[in-house]
Structure formats: C-alpha cells, structure tokens
Image: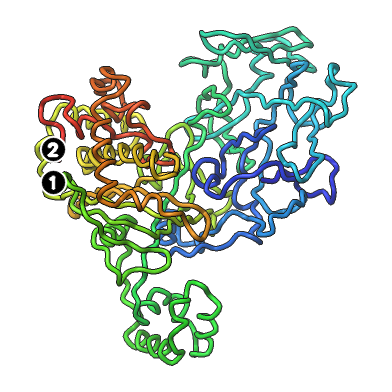
Amino acid sequence: MTIPARTPSKKGQPTRVGGARPSHLITSGGVGSVVDLPSMSVVVRSTDTWALERAEAIDEPRLLEKVRTTLGPQIKVLRTAPWDPQDSDDPWTRTGVPVSPFPRWLRCPRCHRLGPIDPPGQFELVHRSGRRPDLAKWVHTTCQQQTQNRDARKRACLPARFLTVCEAGHLDEFPYVTFVHHGQEHPCLGPKLTMRDSSSTLGPRVTVRCLECSASRNIADAAGRDGWESLPACRGRHPHLQRFEPCGRPLKLTVLGASNLWFSVTASALHLPQGQTVTDLVTANWELLGQQPNSTLVQMIINGIDSLRGLRGVSAEEVWAAIEDLRASGGPSTEEAETDLLAAEWRLLSRPTTEREDDDFRATPSETPTGYKNLIDQVVLVSRLREVQALLGFTRVTAPDRRELDPANRLSLSRTNPTWVPAFEQRGEGVFLQLHEAKVREWETRVADHPRIMALRTAFVRWSANRDRPVDNDFPVARFILLHTLSHLLIRQVSLECGYGSSSIRERLYVGTPTEPATGILLSTAASDSEGTLGGLVALGKPVHLKRLLDQAFADARRCSSDPLCAEHVPVDPSETLHAAACHACLFASETSCESNNRWLDRAVIVDLTGDGLAFQP
C-alpha cells in the first residue's frame, strides 16, 4: 500500500506504508474499506488511481461473463492488484495500491490534542526507513510534552476513532468542531480541541473540549437511537472516490474498525476444463481466433498466449481448418450464458470424469463411509482446483445477501465507468459431498410447515422488509439450512485434522433451482501459490477418515455449551435473526469460511433437539 507524500520527499513520489495479501484486497479490505495499519488508518482508493503496469490479467471466461452481466459490457478484463515480482524494497516505487489517510483527524497520545491533518504544520508524516513501512507514522510536531524529542522518537498519533455513516453508504469524519460548539451564539474563531477518555460501562465517555472557548461535550450525546439529532445531515462523502454527492440523510455515529463499515460484493467461479477437441478449443476462444486473417497469425497468437496452450500441440493447418469450418457455418452457436455460476460446477462435480480434467481441475469419486449411505449419495475428492474471485463493489451498514451481486446499496469501485475489476486466483483442493436428492426432497416436503422452519421464513420476510428488498419466495429454506448446518459442522471437524485453520476452509453450497435442484457441499482450501496446497484436506475425504469426522460432527451437534439457550432459540417478532439453534460455541464460522454470514443454521435439522420429527434421519 502506498500513500501520497505530503511532505518533502525524494522525487515527490508516494511512500509505502503497509502491505496486504491479494485476497485481503478482495474479501475483507478492498476499495473503500478502512484498513488499520500498525501506526495509522487509511482508506483504499478507487481503482482508477491504481497503476496497472504490474497488474496481471486473469483468464476465467465464466466469471468475466458474469461480471459483464452485472456491471456492463464495458468490462474487458479481470486484473490482479499491482505487485512487484522482485519484491523491491524501494520506498518510492509506484507498485502497490494507493491509499489515503482516513480519518484525517488525529489525537496526540501525550497532550491529547485533537486536530486534522490539514492544513499541514500541526501533524507530520514521518517515514525514515523505506524497508520498514510499518514504522511510518504521524507525529504531533507542536506537542509541548515532546518538544525535546526528534520526530523519529515521538509517539505516533492515533486516528480519532469516531466516524459517521448514513444508510446510503456515505462515510465521513465526525464533525468535532460543530458538535462541540453546538448552540453557541458566537462561533469560536480559533478552535483548539482536545479529546479525553474515561472508563464507563454505560456507553462512550469521551469528552471533547475546546481550549479557546472552554466549550465541551460528550460523544455520548451523538450515540443511541436519537443520536442523529445531534449531528448534521449527511454531506454525501465517498473518501475512496475523494468526492461528495447530494445526500441529506441522517447520520449515525460509528467507530473505527466497526464490522459493518465494509462488506464486499464478490463473484467467484471454479475453473472448469474446456472440451478437448480442436473445435471445442477454437470455439472457446472464438472472439480472438475468429478475427484472424491467416493461419500464420493464428499460430503466432497460440504460441504467445498462455490460455491457448491446449492448441500448441496441434498443427496450424488443423487449427485453421477448424476456424474455416466454423466460419462457413456462421460461427459457433451462441448459447445463452448461464446466470448461475454454480450450475455448471454442480454438473461436473456430481458426474466427475477423467475426460474433463486439466492442470487446474482433477476430481475422483470415492466410496461413501459406512453408516452414511442413506445421507450421502457420493463423495468426490477434488485433488486440484482453481478458484477466481472478483470484486464488483461493496456496501456499508447492511451486508448483501448470499451471492447477491447487485444490491440496491452497492457502491462503485471507480469514479468513472470501469473497464476492469480487481480479482485474485487461488489453487488448492477440496472434498465434495452429494446428498441423496430423493431423500432430501422427501424430508423437505415433510418439514415445510414445521414451526421452526416457518419461524425462519417469517423472520426472512421481516429481514427483507427492513432492508427494502423483495422476498425471495423460491428460496429453499429447509434444504439450505440442512446443507449449511452440515457444512459448518464438518468445517469445525476438518480444521482439527487437516492442518489448515478453520478460517482457511471455505464452503460452497449447491442448492440448485426449483426446476433443477441440487444437494451438494464443497469444502475447499486454497493458496495463492501456483502449486496449490499439500493434500491434507483430500486425504480426509477417504472413507475411514470421513466416517470418523461425520460421527464426531453429529455427536457435537447434540450439545452446545450455551444450551439450553442455544437449542431453544427460535426467532420471534420483531427479531429478524436468520438462525435458530446456532451460536459461536457450536456452529458459527469465520466470515472467510461462510458464504451466508452465519445465517440459515439450525442444529435441530441434523440431530433430534425438538423430539417432533424435524431432524433429517441419515
């Protein structure tokens, strides 16, 4: 991460202030997010400020088509974040993701002075060592208690931790000056503020005081349900875009690091092997190959583009013949693109074959563990997989629903109409479990009117209404809860034995549609390294190990340290909680593992907690 230099520096170039993994810039700290660095807080700037000289393109046609469907046909490519393959220590390199200080109000830990970075003079950015970006810090240059110390020895100033946010997703500084001087007849001509904390269990006890006019006020006045009355109307600020827009909505007090300040809107797809015939490969790359005038140029393109490596063992004459045949027939047939990225994955995982394998996908059926043949129809060991994930936007305050790519409150990544979006790819392994469709359908029909299922449906209606979203009446509540709960139980068990932490194991649920239902769970782990992972997860998919994991998962589902409160929990009006018997002690998983934000979970559908036939009997 680089921050524009505001103080005299070599060549006036940006300076490096921190680092982040490529996956972090997509899933939990991307464009528009406030990132907490060791000595400062920054906001990630919009994609139109990124330097693309070292941002590589990622080839994944299925995902690119989905992004185009959502954001528009102007999207041409998926790109990685800019990176330096030499891992240069040059502090002035442009390689990196641009960030800006945010919030721009700082507090001195020694004299408690509270003030903005602008205008310069009061606070200064100190960055003496380019090889240690974590040492970059803001210091209070006029602090009377540190005047004898050199800047390098002065304590780092802390970002003022209070922010404001509105329902439209605008994020802004807390209006300290107007807040403290509220109601004064004569404005303070030269406000000099301090901020002091005091411990309390009743709410924020933070006093902001003006040294010039002695006005003071507690931040608690802006907290609570009616706190917006003490704040001005929203001025429509987007710090990542560095612009304002008309708004006027009420503001809410929030704090730096609040979990609802940034939710990613992402789309992900597994790599699926293309057809192996020459015609299939030409068809998959027709947009490029179909425009070439002769076989010589076609061969040069094949030799130069890695995504066409499957055609390198074929003679130029054979490839050109396939192109001519397709041209004679009017080009490849244009089938309507699937709107659901999971549909093609489900078809391949549920019917794995050695004819559809390559270096990035390899799946082999395995035996079903003894005692679980009534529950599990098939186990598939995915020893090689590649997942590409793209960032389409983000939301604030309210998280998007599962795989929702166009929520009403989605914010843009760029000031202009984007032609690319950030993405990253990972290679790894996984275990796919396919449940018996007939048995799941029979159970789903039987419990459709069960009080717990109906309570969750009703809570879903309230949840949708409170967010101005249409209710998805086709959402298979019972089916999804069954698959999701079993998935979380297995994540907890697998993480104890496979060598990967629970936050490194991701779920991918296949529930299908009313016309084409599916019952699949893919647990996978991946790494950014081109060689993928080490096989620890696939090994646990073998019958002897999987049986032990399933036995322990079902045993753990029968008890929770929070019982009976957890087991008896059912959402009732006005609650909009979308889970029943589930909590952090038994089912909840990290946000990097769960694709539904820990919604739609209930241990009662797996084991008999209610004694009324709700549990699915394996």
Q: Is residue 172 above or below residue 349?
A: above
Residue found at x 69% / y 25%? 158
SS of the residue at dot 2? loop
Tell me the amino acid under the disc marked 2: Gln
Q: Nearer the viewer, residue 272 or 363?
A: 363
Where in the figure is residue 468, as x and y percent of width and height? 35, 34
Residue found at x 23% / y 27%? 558
Where in the figure is residue 519, as x and y percent of width and height? 22, 49
Q: Nearer the viewer, residue 482 or 324?
A: 482
Judged left or right of residue 504, residue 212 is right
Q: Is residue 281 above or below residue 201?
A: below
Judged left or right of residue 10, residue 462 is left
Q: Quadrant of residue 19?
A: top right
Q: Nearer the viewer, residue 266 or 281?
A: 281
Label 2 with label 1: CB-CB less than 8 Å: yes
Where in the figure is residue 221, as x and y percent of width and height? 56, 11
Q: Which residue, as the protein is rendered here, is positioned at the far front?
A: 544
> Real-space Cα distance between discs 2 and 1?
8 Å
Judged left or right of residue 167, residue 113 is right
Q: Is residue 463 above or below residue 487?
A: above
Residue 566, label in figure: none
Q: Which residue, as the protein is rendered here, is positioned at the far bottom?
A: 317
SS of the residue at dot 1? loop
Q: Quadrant of residue 55?
A: bottom right
Tell me the amino acid under the disc marked 1: Asn
Residue found at x 36% / y 71%? 274
**Residue designated by label 1:** 374
**Residue designated by label 2:** 617
Quadrant location of the N terminus?
top right
Mark 1 is surrounded, within 10 Å at the Cα level, by few (under 14), some (14 to 19) or many (20 or more) other residues, namely few
